[in-house]
Each structure stands twice: as C-alpha cells, then as structure tokens.
Image (cartoon, rainbow, N blue to C red):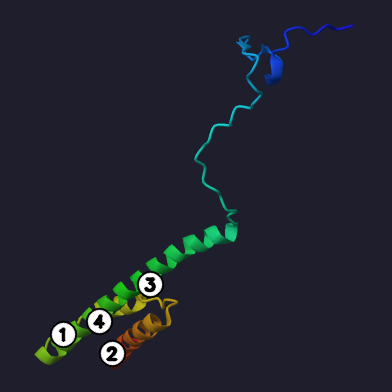
Amino acid sequence: MTRVSGLGGPGGIGGTARGGTARPAGESFSLAAPAQHATAALAPVSIAALIGLQDEGGEARRQGAAKRAGERALGALAALQRAVLGGGAPDLDALARSAAEIELPADPALRAIVGAIRLRARVELARHGRL
C-alpha cells in the first residue's frame, strides 16, 4: 500500500512543481497564462481580389495615358489652327501620331471626351488628305 505523508492542512497537498522546487503546502494549483501576442486576424484573400486590385491600378494608368494622349492631340490641333491662321504649313505628322496614340478608357465620361478629341483630329487629318 502507498503511503501519503505531508498533508498540509486545508490548503491541499504539498509537492514539487515543475523545475524541481517545492511549493508551500497551502498554495493552490494554477496554470500559467499563455503569453499574449499581438496578432492581426487575417481574412482569406482570393486570387480574384488580388487580380482586381492589380487591374484597378492598371485602369488608373490607362485613364492617365488616355488623358495625356488627349492633351497631346489638343495641343497638335491648336498648333494646326495657329499654322492655318498664320499661313504656315501645319504639322500633320504630329497630329496623326497623337491621334493614333489615343486609346479609349473605361470611364464613360473620359471616354466621351477623349473620343471627341480623337474624332476631331481624324476630321482635320481627312480635310488635309492625310487619312
């Protein structure tokens, strides 16, 4: 038969804790609290969402490129107007290049504006026999 000795009164049984050190007889059992780590909850990310984010940046770049191409075409149209009014030779090559660079963006308002600029450039090229 096993013999138990060293009962320590109403607090419980004395014994050894981890690490080999003895605890007092009146100490109750408790677990060490796990260390608190600051972790952010990660939401699941889908491939479609990542591609959508990449495409969003691409659309912004395309809209910016369409806007710049439209501005260059407007500059070429203004230069054509000055040349015609001043009696000089218009630079139709610059107008043709700027009109060819214009790609219509997805934004409906910008698409309408850039489309009108491109149409006007093509009309002027046709008037001068370059289309």
Residue situated in front as seen by the camera: 65 or 41: 41
Camera sees residue 40: yes
Residue shown at 66% from the left, 24% from the top = 29
Q: How far apart, in angstroms, are the residues tagged by discs 1 and 3? A: 32 Å
Residue bearing the label numbered 3: 63
**Amino acid bearing label 3:** Gln
> Counting residues from the N terminus, which is met first, the one under dot 1 or under dot 3?
3
**Amino acid bearing label 2:** Glu
**Amino acid bearing label 4:** Leu
Q: How far apart, in angstroms, are the residues tagged by discs 3 and 2? A: 24 Å
Residue bearing the label numbered 1: 89
Residue bearing the label numbered 4: 74
Q: How far apart, in angstroms, are the residues tagged by discs 2 and 1? A: 14 Å
Q: How far apart, in angstroms, are the residues tagged by discs 4 and 3? A: 16 Å
Specify whether 117 is left or right of 10.
left
Q: Check residue 124 in the rendering and tell me which mark sits there, or answer none.
A: 2
Quadrant of the rendered image containing residue 121: bottom left
> Counting residues from the N terminus, which is met first, the one under dot 2 or under dot 1?
1
Residue shown at 28% from the left, 90% from the top = 124
User: Are the residues tagged 2 and 1 within 8 Å (C-beta)?
Assistant: no
Q: How far apart, in angstroms, are the residues tagged by discs 4 and 1? A: 18 Å
Residue shown at 60% from the left, 57% from the top = 46
Residue depth check, mark 3 versus mark 2: number of the one nearer the observer? 3
Most distant residue in the right direction? 1
Q: How far apart, in angstroms, are the residues tagged by discs 2 and 4? A: 12 Å
Query: Which class describes the residues within 10 Å of circle 4: few (<14), some (14-19), or many (20+)?
Result: many
Identify the secondary structure beneath mark 3: helix
Residue 3's spot in the image, x, y percent? Answer: 83, 6
> Counting residues from the N terminus, which is met first, the one under dot 3 or under dot 2?
3
- The vertical placement of 79 against 22, above or below, is below
Residue situated in front as seen by the camera: 88 or 78: 78
